[in-house]
Amino acid sequence: MSPTMKWVVGALVGLPLMCCGCGGMWFRSMFPHEEALARVTNNPKVIKSLGAPVSGAFFFSGETRHQDDDAIAEMTIDLSGSKQDGVLEVKAVQTSKVWGFSRLRVVAEDGKVINLVGGP
């Protein structure tokens, strides 16, 4: 392959990956995804139920509403552990760029529910 062709192929493959990667980081920072996972994946009750290590999916489903520096988010994030999988349910409010959680609830495959914030 010629040097020019290598640059063309590299640009065609690398540029979209680079843009999506940076855009993905910006996009995810709009949501409480990483903070919610940090609180849950190290929680002893969650580790006991799902099995260590507990990890969360990169992608999530849900919705958010933004207005200036404030937002409301509701999302679900798939979790996996060495014993079983589960789902993290999140409800959060952002005020002045700081997220607060009204719900962090893990629902394991076996039906066990672990409330880390908020009620049932």
Image (cartoon, grey):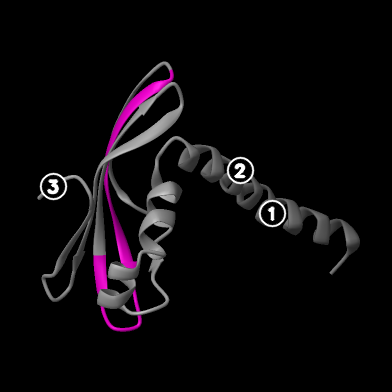
Q: Amino acid at mark 3?
A: Gly
Label drawn at residue 119: 3
Give the amino acid at mark 2: Cys
Task: Note whether residue 63 is visible.
Answer: no
Query: Which stretch appears magenta?
Result: 69-86
Q: Is residue 42 above or below residue 26?
A: below
Tag 1, which secondary structure?
A: helix
Q: Main secondary structure of the magenta part?
A: strand
Q: CA distance from mark 1 to mark 2?
A: 12 Å
Q: Write down the residue under mark 1.
A: 14
Q: Is residue 70 magenta?
A: yes
Residue depth check, mark 3 versus mark 2: number of the one nearer the observer: 3
Direction from residue 118 to residue 25 in the image, left or right: right
Q: Left or right of 23: which side holds 47? A: left
Q: Residue at x 19, y 45 (%)?
A: 118
Res. 95 image quadrant: top left
